[in-house]
Image (spheres, coloured by chain):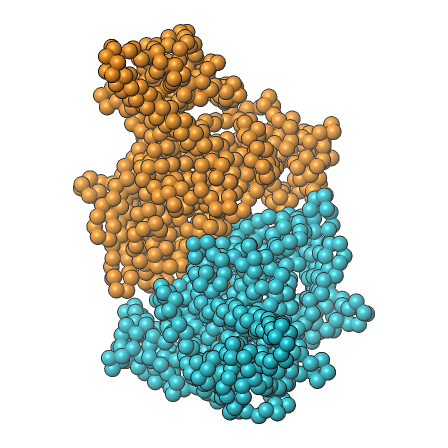
Chain colours: A cyan, B orange
Amino acid sequence: MTGIAQKLASNQKQVAISEFFEKNKHFLGFDSLARSLITAVKEAVDNALDACEEARILPTIKIQITKVDAKKDIIRLVVEDNGPGIPQKSIEKVFGQLLFGSRFHAIRQSRGQQGIGITGVVMYCQLTTGRTTHVRSKIATEPTAAFVDIGLDTRKNKATKANAGREIWYNEDGTGKEHGTEVTAEMKAKYQKGRQSVWQYLRMTSIVNPHAEIIFVDPEGEKHHWTRVTERLPTKVESIKPHPHGIELGQLQRMIAESKDLNLNHFLLNNFSGVTNRARKELCQAAEVEGTRKMKSVKGDDIRSLLEAFQGERVFNGLPVKLLKPPTNCLSPIEEMLIKKGLSKTIDSRFVTTLTRVPSVTQGNPFQVEVGLIFGGGMLADKPVEVLRFANRVPLMYQQGGCLLTKAIESVDWRQYGLDQAGGKGVPKGPAAILVHLASTNVQFTSEAKEALADNAEVMEEARKAMLEMGRGLRKHLEKKKKMAKTREKFELINDILPAIAEKSAQILERPVPELSGSITKIMSAVISESTTVWNKETKETDVEIVLFNYTSRVRAYTILATWPEKSGATMERNETGGRKEALGVWAWKLDSLQPGERTSIKYSLGGLEKGDWTETEILFRGSQDVIGATKMDEKFLQEIRRQEQILDENDSSSPEAGDGKEETTPTVEVHKVATAEEQVEPTVAPPNGQRTLFGGDV
Amino acid sequence: MTGIAQKLASNQKQVAISEFFEKNKHFLGFDSLARSLITAVKEAVDNALDACEEARILPTIKIQITKVDAKKDIIRLVVEDNGPGIPQKSIEKVFGQLLFGSRFHAIRQSRGQQGIGITGVVMYCQLTTGRTTHVRSKIATEPTAAFVDIGLDTRKNKATKANAGREIWYNEDGTGKEHGTEVTAEMKAKYQKGRQSVWQYLRMTSIVNPHAEIIFVDPEGEKHHWTRVTERLPTKVESIKPHPHGIELGQLQRMIAESKDLNLNHFLLNNFSGVTNRARKELCQAAEVEGTRKMKSVKGDDIRSLLEAFQGERVFNGLPVKLLKPPTNCLSPIEEMLIKKGLSKTIDSRFVTTLTRVPSVTQGNPFQVEVGLIFGGGMLADKPVEVLRFANRVPLMYQQGGCLLTKAIESVDWRQYGLDQAGGKGVPKGPAAILVHLASTNVQFTSEAKEALADNAEVMEEARKAMLEMGRGLRKHLEKKKKMAKTREKFELINDILPAIAEKSAQILERPVPELSGSITKIMSAVISESTTVWNKETKETDVEIVLFNYTSRVRAYTILATWPEKSGATMERNETGGRKEALGVWAWKLDSLQPGERTSIKYSLGGLEKGDWTETEILFRGSQDVIGATKMDEKFLQEIRRQEQILDENDSSSPEAGDGKEETTPTVEVHKVATAEEQVEPTVAPPNGQRTLFGGDV
């Protein structure tokens, strides 16, 4: 007796993950012929950069694209790196098996996470051209390189391999290659130029990976070279354990079921970050579960109670159990100076401001937002600003509209910061580019193609705060520029017209031309400061000069302060005017008496920097009268800097998980609500931990 | 001897698809607590609708949401349907195993395709609450229902089951349930109201599934009921074989490798749609591969040659081999009248126009675009128009900005059609709502959450054309409305003021009031038509009346034509004025002499319709003088209608794959380039096949 239900059920079967992604190859970024090529380049380059970073090798990556058959849109892509290489027996799995990789379970920042990317490329090549992908790889401990042609049995999600062998791998100059991997893939694809192109992808990659050397030979044979801007590798990231605040019930159940720990005490100490011995005791008491219980006996309601203790719903001594924050050495931000350098190098402009927020946490995953803004210069004023989005140092080139990072930009009313924006909504217009980078142990994309970030309240809040802070920097810059321009205009008027009138009058009256400096001073009635920050080729130092003019009729006294990149290891050289360190990155000079009409200057040089590292010095002052061209020292600002200094000192002397001393009350994870009025945000910006600065100026 | 490469490789392992989606649950639509609930409802309701449709059952679906623990955001969702039910042994796989299902390899329109959705719900419940999902299902051929608690072993992608058993399933009224499925799931989620809510999702579902009855009990216990609007089930869809034009090389290689056909001749005839016996012969000759070759011997270059013959790169007698188009009985569009009905029912408005394009093909997959537009009424004029997106009858509620359907709307310059649009870009503003529905055998979404369509040039082109055509309809409506308003104003002025002046003058002159009708006619100098289309409760018919006034000084002669829904099975009743059928859906009456000042009317009723099916009759005329309120009959329009009629007749008499008679030249798949100027598009709109109409009017 069979009916419709049986008939329908009889058609059901299991689909392999590879069949799924072959049918849905657009999920992986293989939708159009042009995008497919970019996706392939991206997957290969991401892998190369990740491998180099893990092996602490400065990456040199060569990308070559050739048209095999222009009529049928068949393209050959060769990507070669100098990474550690892949052992022969691992090659087939890495390239020919989906969801195979090392980074899926690791909680740390990396470009690749799922083990899908490069196998997707192999699959796409096979599907569109019927060809296998040729892989050659050499590891340092073996004399020869292994090579093999890899395909994919999509019904089984298994690699197929052919023509495997070993050979000596020669570099172009005839020397033997020490280590590295080379992938040669032929696919149906189209090479194109413009905003969404391989060239643009590589250019953006070089901005956020200044430690990489990238060489690209395009189909016309033209060679594009992005040089290494810094020899410093990104900070090494460490895998961390999950934090109790980010654990879901189902996950905790599985961890407990799979645990090989002796008992609950060991389990809590061994498997989580942020759980000290004291916290372990208190969690057990709050959950009313004995710490000496064997893992097999911890079940059902015990697990629920534990989770409630994790989340502060069950308390110890009337309070949620205090936990340490998750360590942030799993993250590797680009950092302000390198972003600034990358941006200035790539886009010619006059004002750059960058900002790295302190790490925050969402669902137990540490993350960090970095932003940069370039203003003025050769950019178009009546177009939407260029948005440069990055996640874990990978450029995001598609689906801009659907991306959380774009939404964060759109959520700000940029009109108050000097940019055009229709109705205070959407991407602002103006001669500017905005860069946003999310570094996270678990970047949540909207799809496997990794082109847009999914919605997340905490990340949104951090990105928005960064935008607001950067916006204030932009407004300050624009206001200062306007004020300076006005003063200069007045000054020029007075200096040109007043003497001319005096001369004319004197001529008519046949009297001598009067001395005018006193009058000019009276009319100007201002103290003006100007500063220059210039790279000195000869000394390899950055020369700074601060000039002050007293155009008032009284003696003036000030403390003049200047920002400098102390944090980045700069040294103060040839500072003949002396002064003293006011705070981290702020130097101060006391000017006891600046006479009416007097001009004085402060000169010093900064050592330990490279060209382009420091191009703008911010001048501040302390005193009762305004100084045009300088910002009045805000004591809050100073306190802020001092607090950071203190934190830095602390961080130097103790590891993040050092003990019970630095604990804070649960919830450790600060969940910020999106503030409705911008003013509300400002007081909470004060970072509880880590580094933070804002620096900007005319480049 | 181990180095860094070995160390890195040693950490690599295989990840299960279930682990992948657990970590990336946001890919499946489980990102925020509010959205997770909508996703769960959506997956359960989609399954219910699909199952009912396949079993040809008119669906009745009950959804109940209860707050289990409001503080901890735990929600219970119960979805019950009257579908065919699931056999006991299939339940665990359907609910507890990802990528298990019946629709993955089938080429036909369905809501679910991947076998991910409902298992994703089970996984999300388990992860967030640690609880299993209770499933109860009864099939017609068994006396009792099976029940079981389903979980998911994510490490293995296998179901876990507990508490399985059988019971009698009673309906609320105590009768025994015949067949159906009930899912009870507890998850961490938030119930909310507004634009993105369960209520809104169900409301939109009811618009495009007018054959479904949906009952929703919200957490406050309030009952929402969307009644069944039509007893007609959607057209039954048939699975089709892949079409040679959509085959990729890798796919063909696999098909040939897995083939159990006797030889190539059989292979070509058995596995593709559109390949006739003649085409089979010609393909073999073009590819230079013997048709009698055994499948095992068809390899490498043979396969490449065959693909080239498929794609018309290899020719027969100097021409590409002619293939039939893929059949379109795999699609089930909603069709204009039901869209119109759904829209009018849901959104109170004054003008509705809808349009169903003829099926087209992309990458071998048939698809069809339908659009609707509502204008005026209670909608806001200064806001962007509401966009209602649907794919295979499923509402899309998130990621509007990143969706192809939105991009199609944005690509049109709506200003020329009477809507506001800043810079002619973006979603237009105005008191309107735009509906877009894509029916396809393979809907390409941007992610597994199925909320936005990925880019595809052919679909984009079709959607854009539909928008343009609909826009022209809107413009026509607005122009007509304006003209009518002007005439009416003039008419009222003349009718009010002229007699008043005449009376006043007569009074002053003490003469009798003159007869004015002649003068009024002279001044108006127009023939005016007005029509009403009204539902008659008593007769259950739609009464239409067309009135004509001759406000000119001459006798006029016209042929008056009116549109009516003949295609939808309406009948012409009580048409005492006679006339004749002019074309499919167009009736004509000849008026030989309409005297100056005369008023005449045409009355008839339409049978076979339901209330709301037909609310506006379009009046056309043929004659030398304009008729205000009617459109001059365009002979092109008529030819168009006649051609459609012919096609319909042909379709009735022959199946789509009937033989060699109806073939067309390769490429069968018309690849339209996106036209840059709107004018370019117009001539190509004429459909080569299938049905098409545009109807609209003041509702």
Q: Residue at x 38, y 49 (%)?
A: B43
Q: Is residue A85 left or right of residue B75?
A: right
The C terminus of chain B lies in quadrant: top left
Q: In the image, residue A691 lies at what x, y percent?
A: 48, 79
Q: Can residue A343 be seen here?
A: no
Q: Is residue A469 above or below residue B676?
A: below
Q: Residue at x 72, y 43 (%)?
A: A71
Observer-nearest of A694 and A450: A694
Q: In the image, residue A367 lies at what x, y percent?
A: 47, 70
- Give the quadrant of residue A222: bottom right
Q: Residue at x 69, y 38 (%)?
A: B308
Q: Can residue A192 be seen here?
A: yes
Observer-nearest of B441 and A319: A319
In the image as oriented, which residue stretches furthest toward the right? A174
Observer-nearest of B667 and B52: B667
Q: Is residue B368 left or right of residue A169?
A: left
- Give the quadrant of residue B175: top left
The N terminus of chain B lies in quadrant: bottom right
Q: Is residue A570 above or below residue B101?
A: below
- Give the quadrant of residue B698: top left
Q: Is residue A480 above or below residue A31?
A: below
Q: In the image, residue A213 lies at what x, y percent?
A: 68, 69
Instruction: Please give the count of numbered marks on the rendered protein.
Output: 0
Q: Residue at x 31, y 13 (%)?
A: B516
Q: In the image, residue A248 lies at what x, y percent?
A: 37, 67
